[in-house]
Image (cartoon, rainbow, N blue to C red):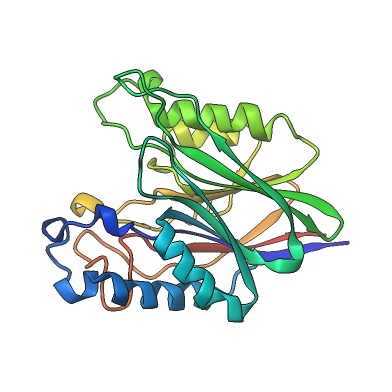
Amino acid sequence: MAIDLRIASYNLLADAYIKPEWFPHTPADVLQPRRRQEALARRIAGLDADIVCLQEVEPDRFAALQKALEPYGYAGVLALKQQGRPDGCAVFHRRARCLGHRAHYFRDRLEDGRISGHLALVLDFDAGGDRLRVACTHLRWDRPDRPVEQHQGMQQAGELIEELVQRDPEAQWVVCGDFNAQPGEPLVRAFAAAGLLDAHEGRHQPTCNANGRAKAIDFIFHSRALQAQPDRLPELDDRTPMPSETEPSDHLPIAARLLRA
């Protein structure tokens, strides 16, 4: 049977990480948690995706989204980061498709020796008779002046590729999330080297403008047997207010239709 589904990825911007001075172009009322919650639920439902991978999801937000998205046929799974971090990754999906899930916690360590607490949330689906595995992750940001070999995001990406994707080559893989890296950078190239395709290859548009610089740092990678038809994003430049009246996060959601004949 053929695979034909829509998948989306969206960094929601955790309330715990909001400081008004970081968003000088955003009206204060737009940053209010209740208002953002309602807007986020509408934005997610409007994506009309079969699988939605979310990052920076707090427990209260997850509970509210479960309630808001249930009428649309979605069920969700949440896995929180470790080390006392307030957020984690969540995946919402149409109920009939999911077979199970697990959280894989990366083993990379912070400068003080503690593990970072970052993770990949992996869900298994029966997609038209194929085994489809979807990993949702939010890789750690690294200072640009650090050598690439010391980047924790790079270490996390390598572990995800080696211990998850390459250990189950018979599955059809989709890896989504906020990778804190841009097209052409070593971290992104690592997924291509592992045999995964970038759903937006050659058609990248900015997904975030944190620190006043528009950039594409959110990705959907997929197995070569799948073909991607990515959605076009709204225009975003260095000065576009994010969040805004129309966009409730500091990231734009990305989505693509994935097909296999």
Say which quadrant the N terminus sits in.
Answer: bottom right
Residue 146, percent from left and from top: 28, 23
Indicate left or right for 242 with 176 as reference: left
- Closer to the camera in the image, 57 or 189: 57
Residue 196, percent from left and from top: 63, 40
Tell me which residue sits at (54%, 63%) in the image. 255
| Above or below, 41 relative to 205 | below
Tell me which residue sits at (33%, 64%) in the image. 249
Q: How many marks?
A: 0
Answer whether residue 226 is visible to the viewer in this image.
Answer: yes
Tell me which residue sits at (18%, 76%) in the image. 29
Answer whether residue 27 is visible to the viewer in this image.
Answer: no
Give the farthest residue toward the bottom. Answer: 71
Tell me which residue sits at (45%, 74%) in the image. 41
Residue 117, percent from left and from top: 43, 34
Write down the quadrant of residue 103 in the picture.
top right
| Above or below, 147 relative to 225 | above
Say which quadrant the C terminus sits in.
Answer: bottom right
Write down the quadrant of residue 183 in the picture.
top left
Residue 201, percent from left and from top: 53, 50
Write down the quadrant of residue 180 in the picture.
top left
| Above or below, 57 relative to 152 | below
Indicate left or right for 49 with 254 as reference: right
Indicate left or right for 36 with 132 as reference: left
Indicate left or right for 24 with 178 as reference: left
